[in-house]
Amino acid sequence: MKKRAISSIFQNRSILFLFFLISYSFAHGQSVKVQPQRVIILMLDGFGEAYYRNSSMPNLNELENKGIFKVVPSLMPSVTNLNNASIATGLLPNIHGITGNSFVDPVTGLEEFMEASNLLLAPTIFQRAKQQGVESVLFSSKKKSIGLLYKGTTDTLSPETASDAWKTKLGSPPSIYSCEVNFWLMEAALYSIQKDTSIRLFYIHTTDYPMHTWAPENDTMKTYLHQLDKYIGKIKQVAPDAAILITADHTVNHKDACWDLNKACKNRNIPIRMAISPERDKYFKHHRGFGGSAYVYLQNQQDLWQVKQSLKKLPGIEEVLTKKEAAKRFNLMPSRIGDLIVLGDNKTVFGDLQSEEYEKLPANYRTHGSLYEARVPIFIYNAHNAPPAYYFNFNYQVAAWLYPSSNN
């Protein structure tokens, strides 16, 4: 009888102890699947350090002071598609394959916009997240980024292709050539962050039209960035649990002059097949397709030395690199760049001109694409499992550490 009583006591205690363990586990999230931290990535197109320092941006100041902040190199050529693909994959161009906004297709030999998803040769952060059961949304003011990066997303949104449902919620989107289009995009992102808690990854890509239009010290620019900063504050307010990761693809500077290398080479009997600006995309009003670097394709490889030396004589050309040199220095995929890459100085760009080989540009002309636009800020805020500050040496690393592949 005594043995039975003792046995009953032990059974009751075991049940109570088991109940305690279950209760403790539930209370500490150990017996239920813990949702990963929400992550909000902002790729602020054209947002160089000078823009940040010249404007009142108290919410970004708080991110800088309470998180990780650095000014780091972006990737060359310093254009959007190459850098956006690098940020969205966490990889270098020699792996993901995007080498500009435009390239010469090695199969067809024709110049093409580099914005189709099949050209991206590495998985996006959205695909890595999906493998781990994480849903994501890609917001971009530029629809070209949706076409390039959408794989693995749960949903996408661009003001340029907004559905009637979004127009009903937020009104018709403003023109892509405006500051307001970025505010519309931020409103859409805020709506999604607040309403859909199942989405754990948000990627927001603005347009750099304001930076192409105004210098950092311009009052209109300061007003625009102060308003953009308010949206960052709203994101912090509605998603206090979220990691906020911010970087840019390039900054934007004034340029004095443009060379049309196709015309310049023809006029000097320099034998090339073609020259292109990797800056060129469908947003002609932003920059007229002019950028601070150019890819040059030869008719014959035997002409390489002659062409290289001849190009170096043109005023405003700072360096001319061979394919091998450029691929090694800038981590580019050799099959998707020119036989030569031409780098302009801080005032010179390259692109197609209507009639002349050379054009003096207006005082308000601004663009990017050179080494002089390849430094940008990076902010890491409230990210629970982020690497230490010394990990972040380039813009593409801002979210490279998230959702590591099982193959790594």
Image: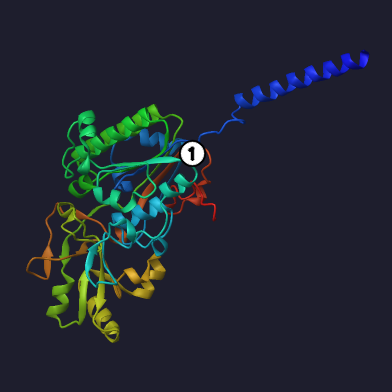
* Tag 1 secondary structure: loop
Residue 220, position as x, y percentages in the image: 18, 39
Residue 302 visible within the image: yes
Residue 59, position as x, y percentages in the image: 36, 33
Quadrant in the rendering for residue 262: bottom left
Query: How many numbered marks does the figure carry?
Result: 1
Placement of the N terminus among the 4 image quadrants: top right
Quadrant in the rendering for residue 183: top left
- Which amino acid type is marked by label 1? Ala
Q: Is residue 38 above or below residue 373?
A: above
Q: Residue at x 61, y 30 (%)?
A: 31
Q: Residue at x 56, y 33 (%)?
A: 33
Which coloring applies here? rainbow
Q: How busy is the neighbourhood of tag 1: few (under 14 within 10 Å), some, or many (20 plus)?
A: some
Of 283 and 387, which appears nearest the observer?
283
Of 281 and 394, which appears nearest the observer?
281
Of 226 and 326, which appears nearest the observer?
326
Q: Residue at x 25, y 72 (%)?
A: 108
Q: Is residue 339 above or below residue 354?
A: below
Q: Which residue is mark 1?
A: 383
* Residue most extreme to the right: 2
Residue 354, position as x, y percentages in the image: 8, 66
**Left or right of 383: which side holds 267?**
left
Quadrant in the rendering for residue 222: top left
Residue 264, position as x, y percentages in the image: 15, 75
Q: Is residue 337 above or below residue 403?
A: below
**Left or right of 198: which side holds 103?**
left
